[in-house]
Amino acid sequence: MEGVEERRPLLINREETNESNQEKAVSCQGSDLEEPVATSDWRAPATILGIECLESMAFNGIATNLVVYLRTVLHDDNASSAAKVSIWYGTSYFVPIVGAVLADTWWGSYMTVMVSLILYFLGMMGTTLSSLIPTADLFPSCDDKDSDITRTPCNAVSAPHKLELYLCLFLIALGCGGVRSSLLPFGADQFIDTNHTDQPKKASFFSWFYVCVIFGVISSGTAVVWVQENVSWSLGFAISTFCVSLALVWFLACTALYRRKVPSGSPLKSICQVLVASLRKIGLNVSKQGASLFEVDYESSNGEVGSLKRLAHTSDFRGVMQSHLTECNQRCR
């Protein structure tokens, strides 16, 4: 109608869009989900919680007593054992950053968890086999003054034996990091954000996930450690290996239940772009209403609107708002 200014909302109503175009997900056959599901399948989140219980038991079954194992079996000194375990812990907590980038950009959460569990299992199996090497128990303890002096000294544990163990521990760190970075987001993907009945279930899922983490810590710190110290190290490591193998088989067996999202890019890239753009435009002024800010319609490569949501404009983090100023705003000012 002439003379009447057309008004468009600053924020796009994603709820109306998502009714016709559900969150872009891929079924187990790789096809897009065309029709929205009324509610999520409870079996998929329950499976992920069970897998987290097994993963937590496996990791802590190795980590809790690892310093003691290096000291008593490989005959390292206390300082060296503690330093090696600290490096191993640091690696296992750094790898999730790499795993998250892989999952968000290329592989997706499902593939990242699957590959990580395979690496996890290989590392656990190698660690268990390493503890079965009979020569490891033939060396006298460094504190055993009555040991036969004709036998090999306690610090003569073969280098290949140590190297094998360290490589297996490295595989465990890689697998653990990949699972930590992707299993929880993958569990959240099983819920439908636009379904009001799924929203409280999703919040409850996060709480139960960390309950599973604590369960693994407590169970492995008591039962598995007792087996290692009173029965044998090999049996204790075998329990952890069994937990990972069961988690891998369980995860693959329930593939048909999962909802899989298409990777949409890592948020780390967007954060870096915002910081760089803010530094370049640090001298520009931003209106309080945010009318001069550049807005993007999030669309997928085939033109369909994605599942990303836009938040309402606020006055918080004004230090990075310059990054959203357009080139026209820069020239006009």
Image (cartoon, rainbow, N blue to C red):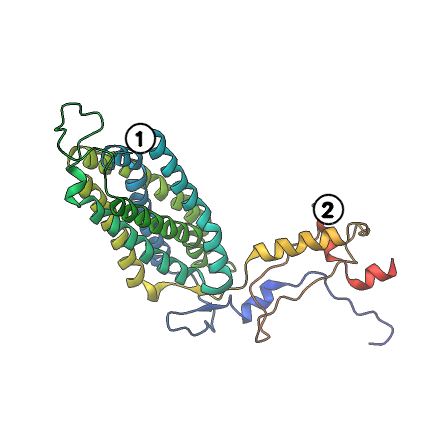
Location of residue 223 by image quarter: top left
Left-right relation of 157 to 48: left
Mark 2: amino acid:
Gly
Q: How many marks?
A: 2
Whether residue 15 is situated above or below residue 149 in the rendered picture: below
Check disc 1 and report its element: helix, strand or loop.
Answer: loop
Q: Residues within 10 Å of mark 1 (few under 14, many from 20)?
A: some
Name the spot of residue 28 as percent of width and height, x first. Answer: 37, 69
Q: From the viewer's side, name the closer residue of 300 and 92.
A: 92
The answer to whether one can see residue 200 in this image is no
Q: Residues within 10 Å of mark 2 (few under 14, many from 20)?
A: few
Q: Quadrant of the N terminus?
A: bottom right
Name the spot of residue 188 as percent of width and height, x first. Answer: 45, 55
Q: Which mark lies nearer to you, 1 or 2?
A: 1
Mark 1: amino acid:
Asp
Location of residue 119 by image quarter: bottom left
Left-right relation of 18 to 82: right
| Residue at (43% x, 64% y) in the render | 260
Q: Which residue is mark 2?
A: 319
Q: Which residue is mark 1?
A: 77
Q: From the viewer's side, name the closer residue of 206 and 134.
A: 134
Label 1 to label 2: alpha-carbon separation: 51 Å
The answer to whether one can see residue 147 in this image is yes
